[in-house]
Image: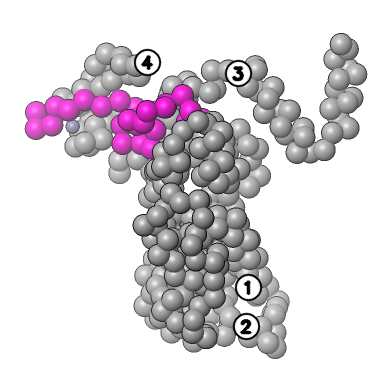
Amino acid sequence: MDANVLLEGIKQLKWHEQQTLYAELRGILYPEEKDVNVLTPELREVRFPHKVRCPHCKAMKVKKHGIYRGRQRYLCLSKRCGRSFNDHTGSPISGTHHPDKWVQYLKLMAQSKSLPATALALDIHISTAFKWRHKVLNALRQLEKDHLGGIVEADETYFLESKKGKHKHRLTNPRKHGGKAKQRGLSNQQVAALIAIDRDGAIVSQIVGRGNTSYVEIDKAIGEHIIPGSILCTDAARNYEAFAKRRKIRHERLNPKYERVRGLYHIQHVNAYHSGLKHWVRDFKGISTKYLDNYLAWFRFFQIHKNKELHAMKKQFLYEAFKSLRIA
Ligand SMILES: [Zn+2]
């Protein structure tokens, strides 16, 4: 077969078909990518940017201590600790039964695949798929929050309280997905997620409470993260006014009924973020409130890395997870 003819044919394909083809080709050319051990040197650098340190006691004095299952082991030389560890200790991929399936697993996570689809594709139990998902997401959540500067848009969006989770591995939710709250308006059945986003794309995203959000809750979520001299843009809600006053932040309030945009000031980025988030969450068919912060971290990850292609994104999950293990 003529490679040029083939190339011309590939150019005719749709973008997502080219992506699939590209992923297949990578698998043929770089089969070792499938094994997470191959990534270890990179992950070690991410985790220990200066020097390998003991994850148990933070000691600097450690020595190499043989290789086990293809991984470098270290021994902590602190007399009080003396424990051993490897580059993966404490990470989501440590101590799991199928280390060979992790890279593939992360690829499916980068595609927001459901737990049943993931379990089926990798031939793992659905509870394993669930555990791995939250190991990764817990790590993403550990990362320090972004600092927000310049024009900062902030607003809450609400999720109906869900106690799903006792039967977390069930494939269907007995309650109707996304059922309606029994009370009108904001009740304690509504869980508030606060999203703050600046024009450089820095994002803070977290659950702040139930029902109406107080300025104290806003302060707790973003107070320390807004750089002095920033301008806060919100809708007309009074809670932000009180927060801005307390923090001495310049505040531009917009009442969407009368004025959506005033010069550079608007909250359209945060509104777009909310609708993207809601749309994405819908595919998971009912998320337990208990795990909502994890899903917020996942969606935030997608927003920050949205321009990366699939194979870079799956690696990025590991980078972020290993970054979260850095010892300050
Ligand atoms: Zn130690």
Say whether marks 1 and 4 touch (CB < 8 Å): no
CA distance separating discs 2 and 3: 52 Å
Q: Report x, y in % for residue 236.
A: 57, 85
SS class, disc 2: loop
In the image, taking residue 55 as reference, residue 271 lies left or right, namely right
Q: Amino acid at mark 1?
A: Ile
Q: Nearer the viewer, mark 2 or mark 3?
A: 3
Q: Residue furthest top?
A: 1
- Residue for point 57% across, 75% down: 233
Provide residue 267's location: percent of width, then percent of height. Answer: 63, 73
Residue at mark 4: 70
- The residue tagged 2 is 254
Q: Is 87 part of what is drawn in magenta?
A: yes
What residue appears at the point 42 percent right and 26 percent down from the top-left corner? 99
Q: Quadrant of ligand 1?
A: top left
Residue kind at label 4, given as amino acid type? Gly
Residue 277: image tag: none
Tag 4's secondary structure? loop
- The residues bearing labels 3 and 1 have C-alpha atoms spaced at a distance of 44 Å
In the rendered structure, which amino acid carries the disc numbered 3? Tyr
| Magenta segment | 79-103
Q: Residue at x 46, y 51 (%)?
A: 170
